[in-house]
Image: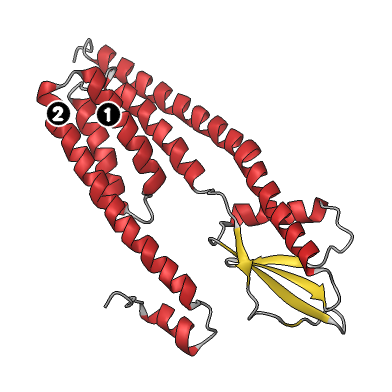
Amino acid sequence: MENLIVLCPNCHQHRYHRSGEFTRDQLRLYRQRLKEQNEVEKRVLQNLEEIRQLVPTTSPEDIEQKLRVELQEAATLVSPEKSPGIYATVQQTSEWLAERDLIRGGARRAIEIEWEVRKEQEKRKYPEVKIQRVDDSAFRKAPNFPRSYYIEFVLDRVPNSDWVDVFMAEWKMSIYNMKRETHIQRDRIVMVAADSDNLQGHADFAKRLVEDTNKRIHTLGFQRIDQWCEQEKRAALQQFDAIQSMKARSKGIKL
């Protein structure tokens, strides 16, 4: 039982009847991460409920601090795509506390916290990528030249498209006397190599590319996320203030 993995029909077809796209190791890793995700979601729900129960006996300042910590941690572990129900509960808890003025500044402060959480969520989309191993079962002939072959380096995750774009930009700018055609395919760096090449040199080159890509994402990329979230937060606060002002002024309207 502990070795069973539930697959949808499409994934089953890909694993056993078509391309063999998913390896056994990938499926085991998926199963482990799915189990971890379920545990994370249960813990997030429990923690949010504990915050609600603390309301009668805890100061607004402590409530806000506990909520901030929980929302920021939840942002690193759940997302609207993978955990829509949990994500909605996180948002509802923030609004519930704001409506009761249990967050200093009420709804306005809730907007600020929401964008702090959003910033963490955006950055979480770009986890650090690492090379795990060389897939010695993936060597095969490449069509580039008579003695060319493919060598594949297995990554610890499937990087998102932005990470891939940065990786390819780093590859184009790199200087390496044996630089060969390279591309990303799912969780693989696929590189063309001659049978006489220094494979260790290729591995060192691939590792350096991955490290440089992570570094660029976590510097320039994160700066852009900070700037974007700050702009959007200011816009949301301006809209909130304008609506509050209009509400206040509308009380003096005589009809």
Task: Check disc 1 and report its element: helix, strand or loop.
Answer: helix
Q: What amino acid type should be assigned to the residue bearing mark 2?
A: Leu
Q: With 11 as the anchor, is 94 left or right in this view? A: left
Front residue (pair 13, 138) = 138
Please give the name of the residue rendered at 87% of the width and 80% of the height, measured from the top-left corner.
145
Front residue (pair 39, 83) = 39
Q: With 204 as the anchor, is 77 left or right in this view? A: left
Please give the name of the residue rendered at 42% of the width and 38% of the height, measured from the top-left corner.
118
Q: With 13 as the anchor, is 62 left or right in this view? A: left
- From this view, report whether residue 216 is shown above or below residue 104: below
Question: Pointer 2: residues within 10 angstroms few (<14), some, or many (20+)?
Answer: few
Image quadrant holding the N terminus, namely bottom left
Q: Position of residue 59 (x, y in %)?
A: 18, 18
Task: Check disc 2 and report its element: helix, strand or loop.
Answer: helix
Q: Residue furthest left?
A: 56
Image quadrant holding the C terminus, namely top left
- Residue placed under numbered mark 2 in the picture: 54
- Residue placed under numbered mark 1 in the picture: 66
Q: What amino acid type should be assigned to the residue bearing mark 1?
A: Lys
